[in-house]
Amino acid sequence: MTWARALPPPLRRCAAAAVHWAWQWAAEAGAIGPNDDRGRRFGAFGRGSLVAFPQGAIYNEHYICIGEGTMVGPYASVTAGMAPGQVMATDPVVTIGDRCVIGRGSHIIGHWSIEIGDDIQTGPYVYITDQNHSYQDPDQPVGRQWPVEASVRIGSGSWLGANVVVLPGTDIGEHVIVAAGAVVRGVIPDRCVVAGVPARVVRRWLPGRGWVDERDVAAT
């Protein structure tokens, strides 16, 4: 039993209340909004948006644009480049649209171009990047080889489940559902459900038929 649990019940209740009050105060005070000094570092930071406390890694904010009414959850990392102070070849590097929700512990790591549309929600621990290690030379450690960049776009109205990984070169259409744990690369059409590693279309919306399993689409 810890010393805190060994306290007399009235004292422990008071201590617990104080801890929870302090954490709630820190969460409110530590959130980044458009009118905060830290918020003004961003290339754009829309009205009603916030980056929740505690934050993950956030740097080179002037290459990052956030729309209106968007929430980036606690412990999330949003970065441009490999290190603070890096001069980027493109501007903006990361764009997050209006009314988005980026889940707790997610990582959006941009180096060239990541465009996240409007009304997009993600589950926790989603990883989105436009850069990957190369391995062309089999005699060199992968970490020493020059990385490869390819733009990423996620269309408006889409949902990414928990632990989704979006790799460089991905172009996800509008109103797409990405199942939890999927690893996505390549072009994903509008209004479909993708799942798996690598992610494949498993359902799609067809006018006049609604949501149809992909195997039934292939059979017709």
Image: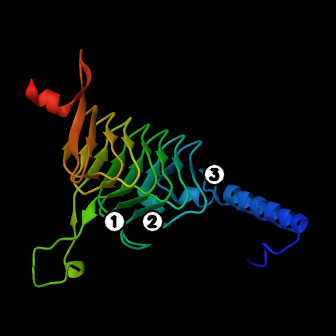
The residue indicated by pointer 1 is 88
On the picture, is 50 further left or further right than 25? left
Residue marked by disc 2: 60
Q: Earlier in the sequence, mark 3 or mark 2?
A: 3
**Circle 1 SS class:** loop
Q: Which mark is residue 31?
A: none
Q: State the image coordinates of residue 134 (x, y, percent, origin top left).
A: 17, 71
Is 192 located above or below residue 70 in the figure?
above
Which quarter of the picture shows residue 214? top left
At label 2, counting other C-alpha atoms closer than 10 Å, the crowd grade (few under 14, some 14-19, many 20 or more) is many
Q: Residue at x 89, y 68 (%)?
A: 11
Give the position of the N terminus as an image quadrant. bottom right
| Residue sitting nearer the eye, 110 or 124 | 124
Residue 35 is labelled as: 3
The amino acid type found where label 1 is placed reads Met
Q: Residue at x 70, y 58 (%)?
A: 29
First in sequence: mark 2 or mark 1? 2
